[in-house]
Amino acid sequence: MRTDHEIKDDILEELDWDPQIKSSDIGVTVREGVVRLYGSVQSYTERVAADKAARQVKGVRAITDEIAVKHELEPTVTDTDIAARIATLWEWNQVLKDFEITADVHEGHVTLFGEVLWNYQRETAYDQVVGIEGVTGVNNQIRIKPHASATNVKRKITAALHRSANLEASRINIEVEGGKVTLKGDVNALYERDLIEKAAWTAPGVTEVHDEIHISAK
């Protein structure tokens, strides 16, 4: 079992190594594998990158993200500016231009609404907004339209898990009801659970993923 000190040291190294993270004002505490990130960064992109970096470290069981976004240009970027830039993104993006996606902006925090056919389209919308100057947070409420049978969804997820060299598919139970997927079982690290959840989202027709996978403390 890895110690909290070892986990913390590895997270700090990941944060220092990631070229997307420019801020040195990120603090890390670890208690029984539960990580707390705090401090401040200059963009929401950095905050997302810091969370992803911590998730890659072996022994991390959960993460509390308390990093604040403090833009250098914060006084000059208005909610109207952010909304206008988002609207432009939709017009020029080949993945999203055929869908009706709307964005509400309040004090830099963006909430996305709409409906798409695939999760990668939903993630594309999120990724596009994350990098906009002035954005302090993104709440992705875009829905996925169901368009596949439960049997096919389960088969696709199971096949994806078996293809992964980092996962033991036999330890994961998959329950499917319409487009809703429930994942159960045990893994050894947070990044393994993330891989399984990602595999579930890649199946056609998945609209919800409920992750009930337990992370072992061993």
Image (tube, rainbow, N blue to C red):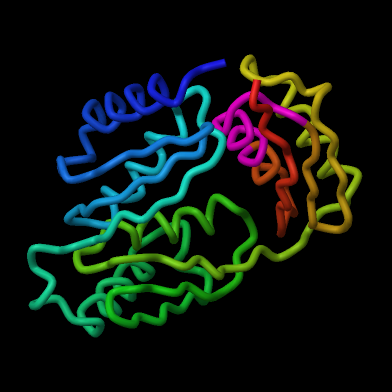
Expressed as whole percent of the image width and height from the top left, the position of residue 18 reads 26, 31
At a point 39% along the width and 43% down the height, the residue shown is 51
* Position of residue 121 in the picture relative to residue 185 (left or right): left
Residue lying at 28% horizontally and 29% vertically, measured from the top left: 12
Image height of 93 relative to 188, above or below: below
Whole-percent x, y for residue 24 in the image: 15, 40
Q: Exactly how many numbered labels are in the figure?
A: 0
Give the residues drawn in magenta, as a range: 186-198
Q: Is residue 113 left or right of residue 126?
A: right
Residue drawn 47% across the image and 57% down it: 95
Q: Nearer the viewer, residue 131 or 46?
A: 46
In what quadrant of the picture does the C terminus appear? top right
**Is 61 or 202 nearer to us in this picture?**
61
Q: Judge whether 61 appears above or below 204 on screen.
A: above
Residue 140, above or below 197 = below
Front-lying residue, 101 or 13: 13
Does the magenta portion include 192? yes
Please indicate whether residue 74 sits to the left or right of residue 50 in the image: left
Residue plotted at (44% across, 61% down): 125
Does residue 9 show up magenta in the picture? no
Q: Quadrant of the N terminus?
A: top right
Compared with 105, 35 (above or below) is above
Q: In the depicted view, which residue is nearer to us: 2 or 53? A: 2
Quadrant assignment, res 8 = top left
Residue 207 coordinates in the image, percent (x, y): 71, 59
Q: Position of residue 204 (x, y in %)?
A: 72, 48
